[in-house]
Image (cartoon, helix red, strand yellow):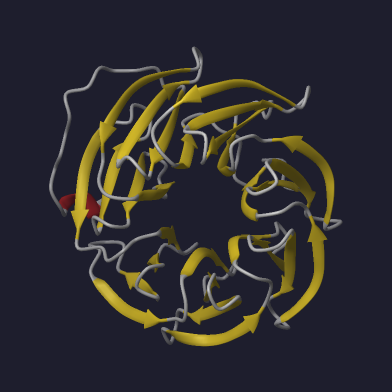
Amino acid sequence: MRYFCYGLLAALSLPSLSAKLAIVLNSGDETVSVIDTTTYKEARRFAIGKEPHHLMATPDDNFLIVANAASNDLVFLDRTTGEVKNRVKNISDPYQIAYSPDRKYFVSASLRLDRVDLYDPANFSVLKRIPLPKAPSHLAFSPDSKLVFVTLQDTHELAAIDLGSRTVAWKLSIGKQPAGILLTPDGKYLLIGILGENFVDVVDWRTRTRVKKIVTGKGAHNFVPFGDGRHAFLSNRAENTISKIDMQTLSVVDSYPAPGGPDCMDVSADRKQLWMTSRWARKVSVLDLESKKIVKQIPVGRSPHGIYLSQHAPRK
């Protein structure tokens, strides 16, 4: 991958671990926790940078990218060990990050700076900085890579950026404090967690209309697909629950306990467990989906946010 020729190489002398890991970003402690998912124990913890909030796999699935919002950089980790492999500097306030489906753009939502930045994924050079009021948060793309959708938490809007012209195409008023955003598998609707209320806004992005509210729980926040091409989980951070949403019927089909302010989640490869960061409890919680019980809680750092399982269910 060409972009690994850029930035500071920061390899660490760390012991080799099993590929069955959970990698957790402790945004308040500026650290990463590496958890062995077979023993449910933290194997190690190391410094990463200021305010690591979100992470994602590279398109080839070999590495994880950690976005350090306050350090203004990206850190590349070995996906199977958690080892630091590379650091790319001068990425301005990367709160949420994503590649466009056609891999032509690397997009960063700069929540604190009120803009979205477009980068060349080959070398991370800036292509365009696009001002957006206010607090751009989470990202999703149209299936054809022509639009990137951005939730604007402080103006209670959804924005669409045209990647061809690199301009804001439109904005739509939605619920209070929109956060996580997910495109349904058929590409028809955007699901948006309304953090300041208790529902998911369903938006037909082609007609730019709100078509439904799916009532879930207070503090509706973030999504992760179940992996079956039909269902997704939503964390209700203020209500301490998880909702399972049917993306065909646009309805809640199940609910689960989730203590400590659930935030980001990932689904185990066998789809039997849901791992989540309990933001206010300094723990990672493991939910058994069949029994609907929390079976493990693993202490980590302060304000755990992003989480990634090295062996997870398909993201569809």
Query: Residue at 64% across / 63% down in the picture?
Result: 196
Residue 109 percent coordinates (x, y): 41, 67
Residue reaching furthest to the top: 39
Of residue 301 and residue 88, the one placed in the foreground of this image is: 301
Residue 105 percent coordinates (x, y): 38, 68
Q: Is residue 76 above or below residue 273?
A: below
Residue 282 percent coordinates (x, y): 47, 33
> Taking 19 as reference, is 252 left or right?
right
Q: Is residue 130 above or below residue 228?
A: below
Query: Residue at 26% across / 73% down in the picture?
Result: 126
Of residue 156 and residue 86, the one placed in the foreground of this image is: 156
Residue 86 percent coordinates (x, y): 20, 44
Quarter of the image for residue 29 reads top left
Quarter of the image for residue 176 reads bottom right
Query: Residue at 38% across / 39% down in the picture?
Result: 26
Of residue 73 and residue 29, the one placed in the foreground of this image is: 29
The reply to whether residue 99 is in sight is yes
The reply to whether residue 188 is in sight is no
Query: Residue at 64% across / 34% down in the picture?
Result: 259
> Taking 166 as reference, is 198 left or right?
right
Residue reaching furthest to the left: 8
Quarter of the image for residue 253 reads top right
